[in-house]
Image (cartoon, rainbow, N blue to C red):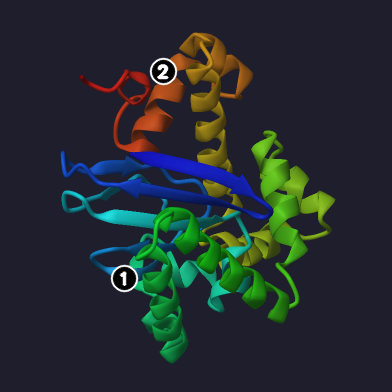
Amino acid sequence: MYSEQAVRGAVRWASVSSGAGPVRVLPDGCLDLLWSSRAGLLVAGPDRTAHLSRSAPGERWIGLRLPPGVGPAVLGVPAEELRDQRVPLADLWGRAAGDLAERVEAATARPGWSAGGATVLQEVARARLRAAGGPDPLGAHVAARLATGATVAATAAEVGLGVRALHRRSRLLFGYGPKTLARILRMRRALDLARGGAPLAEVAARTGYADQAHLTRDVRELAGVPPTRLLAPPAG
């Protein structure tokens, strides 16, 4: 079971594991604040390639997915320090993480556990974001431009930075440079088009790949499997 809901400035999601096998989580440039009924509070850093998430049967998960560039302001650490990692929130917040864990545990012990737990995470994230003065506006601007297919050079010029300076700022905001973020966002744009029914050759042309073979190679490198595998209906 998996469900998600877009809310102001984030995406709330919840799942209950069947324990059938690992779940392939594709990179998206985001950081997630997580709660697991088995592992407690965690942070999922920005991934460069797909992460295979393994859960016990019946394990419950709640997540708050923070848009690209927002996570560092909420969590209080540069995104590159969390790249390709899953770390206990207590490693970052200390005692404050313990207080939050108690609130989430109380919320998830009641009916409507997923909504209650997600609301607690969202309230804390909003409060920390306000205390930090909000996210760096560069993050949203750069991510939005790259998501439309703009080049790194054009994006750097638009925000008034050199390419090297944009690379440094991007590592702090997204966990990796703008070229990597652009590849990830292009892959996700391509998969969205393919899920809408567009043939892969057309998808490749519309999203800036040289051809379908280029699209397949790029998806395989980032996701670990070719697009046909990702687009296949679930077994059973």
Report the residue marked by disc 2. 213
Q: Residue at x 20, y 42 (%)?
A: 18
Amino acid type at mark 2: Ala
Q: Position of residue 162 (x, y in %)?
A: 75, 59
Left or right of 125? Residue 219 is left
Left or right of 136? Residue 16 is left
For the residue labelled by badge 1, is the local secondary structure a helix, a strand or a loop?
A: strand
User: Is disc 2 surrounded by few (<14), some (14 to 19) or many (20+) residues within 10 Å?
Assistant: few
Amino acid type at mark 1: Gly
Residue 40: assigned label:
1
Q: Residue at x 44, y 76 (%)?
A: 103
User: Is disc 1 surrounded by few (<14), some (14 to 19) or many (20+) residues within 10 Å?
Assistant: some
Q: Earlier in the sequence, mark 1 or mark 2?
A: 1
Q: Quick check: can you spot residue 113? A: yes
Q: Position of residue 173 (x, y in %)?
A: 60, 64
Q: Quick check: can you spot residue 44? A: no
Left or right of 97? Residue 51 is left
Mark 1 and mark 2 residues within 8 Å of each other at the beta carbon: no
Q: Quadrant of the C terminus?
A: top left
Q: Nearer the viewer's eye, disc 1 or disc 2? A: 1
Left or right of 133? Residue 101 is left
Q: Position of residue 209 (x, y in %)?
A: 55, 23
Residue 128: assigned label:
none
When the figure is inspected, residue 128 is found, relative to residue 213, above or below; the finding is below
Q: Quadrant of the N terminus?
A: top left
